[in-house]
Amino acid sequence: MNPFKDFPHSDFEVVTPEGEVRESGSGIFTGDTVVVFNEKLQVFANDEIRRRLPNGSDEAFTVVDPVFYQKMMGLEAHFQIKVRRKGTFPHHTGGHFNITVSGENARVNIGSTDNSTNVVNNSGVFADLINAIEGGVENVEQKAVLVEAVKDMEKAKGTGGFAASYAKFMGLAADHIGVVTPFLAPLASMIGG
């Protein structure tokens, strides 16, 4: 006989720290403990247990200590999960469901297709490259030749002549590769564009 069978049960989801729903279940919420009569439940410390409230939002709890108890004296095997309340969030948001996106042209598509085109303004790369050359190349003549080659690349940006300007610059910069290396990827991305 289960003395808890008449207690109110709430449906919940177990959410991993990565934001994935590992499984769903039903349990008794008693403040800082959730009692679950499912001996196969996969729940770990730092998971999140989210129960859906009648208003449609989620009440989120961080799992602190999930403890399993074997069947004994008429009480079914069960978990007593110590939790800490995190708060209430709109359904499937907040808590472990946060999404962080960064970087140029970053985007998130959920249930849709991304048909966008990336456009990155790399005009600052030329000024930064000139500054790096002026600070990192000691020979005055080589410095002047490299700066002029950078200006030629900047003028040719977006034209069919950029690849030739880039190749010329690379030939001149071979002795100063340590100075120009941080700029090679953005410059190379301009070839053909």
Image (cartoon, rainbow, N blue to C red):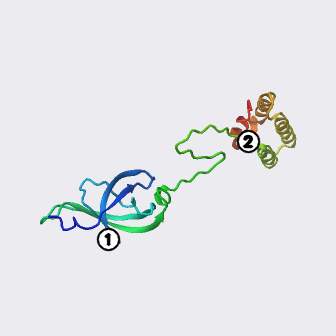
- Tell me if I can see residue 137 in this picture: no
Q: Which residue is mark 2?
A: 180
Relative to residue 119, is residue 57 depicted above or below?
below
Relative to residue 21, is residue 76 depicted above or below?
below
> Could you say which is closer to the camera, residue 113 or residue 79?
113
Residue 140 location, quadrant? top right
Q: CA distance from mark 2 to mark 1?
A: 62 Å
Q: Nearer the viewer, mark 2 or mark 1?
A: 1
Whole-percent x and y of residue 39? 23, 56
Relative to residue 77, is residue 165 depicted above or below?
above
Relative to residue 23, is residue 150 depicted above or below?
above
The first of marks 2 and 1 along the sequence is: 1
Circle 2: residue type: Val
Q: Is residue 83 left or right of residue 180?
A: left
| Quarter the C terminus occupies | top right
- Tell me if I can see residue 147 in this picture: yes
Q: Which residue is mark 1?
A: 30
Residue closest to the far front:
55
Q: Is residue 53 left or right of residue 137?
A: left
Residue at figure coordinates x 81%, y 45% from the top left:
130
Rate crowding at label 1 as few (under 14), some (14 to 19) or many (20 or more) other CA atoms within 10 Å: few
Q: Secondary structure at mark 2?
A: helix
> Could you say which is closer to the camera, residue 124 or residue 25?
25
Circle 1: residue type: Thr
> Could you say which is closer to the camera, residue 111 or residue 18?
111
Whole-percent x and y of residue 113? 57, 38
Whole-percent x and y of residue 1? 14, 64
Label for residue 14? Answer: none
Whole-percent x and y of residue 117? 67, 38
